[in-house]
Amino acid sequence: MNYQKEIAIKHIRRIMNRKGYKFFEVGDYNLNLIGIRNDVLYKNSFDDTLLNIYKVNGKWVWNEFKITTDAGTHYLQNPMNIKGTALVVPNQYKGLWKLGLHRGDYEALVQRGEIEVYRDNNRDKILDFNENTIDKGIFGINCHRSNPRGESSVVGKWSAGCQVFANVKCFEDEFIPIIKVAKDKWGNSFTYTLLTKKDLEI
């Protein structure tokens, strides 16, 4: 790992500690799955980031993936829930996911614990993060891939609130194999932390 990544990991650790979040440092393949949401409110693109930070043989590994942490425009305008479209609230969700099948189709991280979401129900193309609309429960907020044949540039129908990878190879060939190793070592339970771009600037 290079010097810049060492600094980046220390910075992420400080942010997590300041917020009172758990940062996993003990043992190999003890994964820190951290989403970072961009601050653009009008979007339909994969402009967010998923970090997977962990140790192998005591040395830090940093994996970075292009994702969306937000629903696509289609579901903003056509909510699946009567309360509105789900947008994950930044927080740490311990034991949120397990390795399972997304919609019974392919391996992904599927929701097993409760999560908080904003409910955007005005059917426009703007992401609305209104604290008065926060809803908590199990809503099928998974972590999965988009296009099974390559990389998607437009979110569209790929996300109704899930955390979704843009590139299938990054998901299937890089991310899921590490998930399987971690599952065997630590059990089928994965914590997810969602930060914002502003969190990184403090």
Image (tube, rainbow, N blue to C red):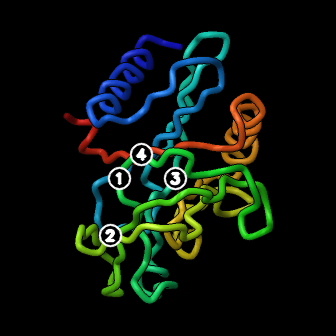
| Mark 2 element type | loop
Residue drawn at x 58%, y 32% as measured from the top left: 31
Q: In this orientation, which residue lies closer to the viewer: 119 or 41? A: 119
Per the model, the C-alpha gap separating discs 2 and 3 is: 23 Å
Packing grade of label 4 (10 A; few <14, some 14-19, many >=20) is: many
Q: Nearer the viewer, mark 2 or mark 1?
A: 2
- Can you identify the residue that label 3 sits on? 67
| Mark 3 element type | strand
The residue under label 4 is which amino acid type? Answer: Gln
Is 131 above or below relative to 35?
Answer: below
Query: Nearer the N terminus, badge 2 or badge 4?
Result: 4
Q: Nearer the viewer, mark 3 or mark 4?
A: 4
Image coords of residue 194 (percent x, y): 41, 48
Query: Nearer the N terminus, badge 3 or badge 4?
Result: 3
Image coords of residue 7 (percent x, y): 37, 17
Q: Quadrant of residue 189?
A: top right
Per the model, the C-alpha gap separating discs 2 and 4 is: 15 Å
- Can you identify the residue that label 4 sits on? 92
Query: Nearer the N terminus, badge 3 or badge 1?
Result: 3
Residue drawn at x 43%, y 68% as measured from the top left: 44
